[in-house]
Amino acid sequence: MEKEQAIGRNSIFRTDTKSLIGAVVMGVVFVIACQVTGQIDNMLPWGKMGMYLINGTVWAFFTAILTLLYKQPGGLIAAEVEAVISVMYSPLWIAFIFANGIASIWVSFVAAKYDMTKWSHHIMAQAGVCVLGNIIVSIGLVFILGLPVNVAAIETLILIAVTWPLATIATKKVYDALLKSGMVK
């Protein structure tokens, strides 16, 4: 029984109905959270410069925590629901599709290798989310919005510097609470 639990916990996949439906519902919550935080960012000085620091932190947190909670394909479903709905509010939606997908898959691989009980596990998971995801969005900034490469690179570095530590802290704290409550299996 212990071996089965260990295999289940470190598995990348979870295909029960509860996980799949939960992922769709939480994907919609993910969209709402990103919309609210995007509006908050727009009211602040950095948002007026086009940097979505609060929104980026919430995006990284949701991408990781939903993948940890629902595994795959649930994490991918939740992330892609957010990305596809973003077609209504951002010309970068195509970049979001790739950023969200790669970030979710990255978290799955880290969670399959580690038990996600240490800070270093969450730092590594969020490294992939924040670095890979923001690099993909940066490419979108250059090719879709036409920003100069140096502007996109500076914005990306600032976003990574802010979102990585904040999303790591949030993900670790929430994941620990989910483990304690028994919601994560």
Image: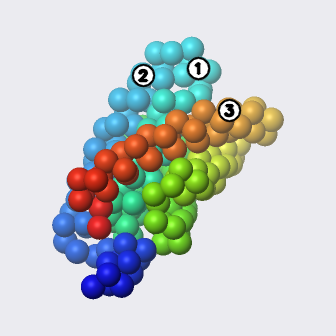
Q: Is residue 38 above or below residue 84?
A: above
Position in image of residue 92 (x %, y %): 54, 44
Between marks 3 and 2 in the image, the one whose residue lies nearer the viewer: 3
Which residue occupies the foreground of this view, 145 or 28? 28
Tally the marks: 3
The local crowd at label 1, few if under 14, some if 14 to 19, many if 20 or more residues have their Cα within 10 Å, is few
First along the sequence among labels 3 and 2: 2
Q: Amino acid at mark 1?
A: Trp
The structure residue drawn at horizontal position 23% and vertical position 59%, both measured from the top left corner, is 182
Residue holding disc 1 = 46
Check the image and name the residue furthest to the right.
Answer: 150
- The image quadrant where one finds the N terminus is bottom left
Quarter-wise, where is residue 47 in the image? top right
The structure residue drawn at horizontal position 31% and vertical position 56%, both measured from the top left corner, is 179
Q: Is residue 97 above or below residue 91?
A: below
Which type of secondary structure does the marked residue at label 2 adopt? helix
Q: Is residue 140 above or below residue 124?
A: above
In the picture, measured across the screen, residue 155 lies left or right of residue 24, that is: right
Q: Amino acid at mark 2?
A: Ile
Residue holding disc 2 = 40
The local crowd at label 2, few if under 14, some if 14 to 19, many if 20 or more residues have their Cα within 10 Å, is some
Q: Are marks 3 and 2 in contact (CB under 8 Å)?
A: no
Q: Is residue 65 above or below residue 105?
A: above
C-alpha span from label 2 to label 1? 10 Å
Residue holding disc 3 = 158
The structure residue drawn at horizontal position 54% and vertical position 30%, both measured from the top left corner, is 53
Which type of secondary structure does the marked residue at label 1 adopt? helix
- The image quadrant where one finds the C terminus is bottom left
Which type of secondary structure does the marked residue at label 3 adopt? helix
C-alpha span from label 3 to label 1? 11 Å
Q: Amino acid at mark 3?
A: Ile
First along the sequence among labels 3 and 1: 1
